[in-house]
Image (cartoon, rainbow, N blue to C red):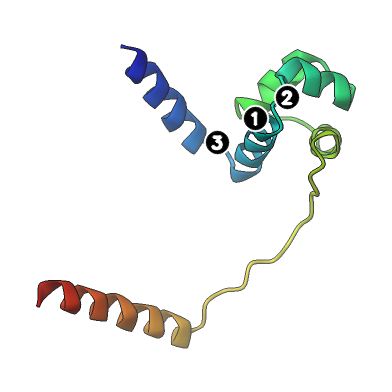
Amino acid sequence: MKQTSNSHKTRKNVDLDPLVQDIVAARRAQKITQAELANFAGLSRRTIVLVESGGDCTLSTLRRIATALGLEMRAHTPQRPTLDDITRQNERLFAEMRARNT
């Protein structure tokens, strides 16, 4: 029964936005409690719980949390793969499949 709870937590974390996942991971890696993070960021613990559960918050709240954790927030434009990139990836995958089947 305990494993079901852990798998539920894992599945729940996978559903979270990657930014929130990074925040939770950073807090845990630094062994900081939600209450400590709230204190460092000048927020309520309830706000930290809300953010970590995927609730909506303001950009300034995210910045305060990130700063308290020593994280940097910045926007970036992901590069779109070219047709050549996709072709190379497909060729690599097909070669791996052929190698496994021989």
Query: Dots 2 and 1: beta carbons under 8 Å?
Result: yes
Kind of element beneath mark 1: helix
Instruction: Give how far across and how far down residue 59 sits, in percent.
Output: 81, 39
Spatial CA span between label 3 and label 2: 20 Å
Q: In the current view of this chain or complex, which residue is farthest to the right?
A: 42
- As shown in the figure, which amino acid type bears the numbered disc 3? Leu
Query: Dots 3 and 2: beta carbons under 8 Å?
Result: no
Q: Which residue is mark 3?
A: 16
- As shown in the figure, which amino acid type bears the numbered disc 2? Ile
Spatial CA span between label 3 and label 1: 16 Å
Q: Residue at x 84, y 33 (%)?
A: 68
Q: Which residue is mark 2?
A: 32
Q: Nearer the viewer, mark 3 or mark 1?
A: 1
Sequence-wise, which precedes: disc 3 or disc 2?
3
The disc label shown at residue 28, or none: 1
Instruction: Give how far across and how far down residue 73 sits, in percent.
Output: 79, 49
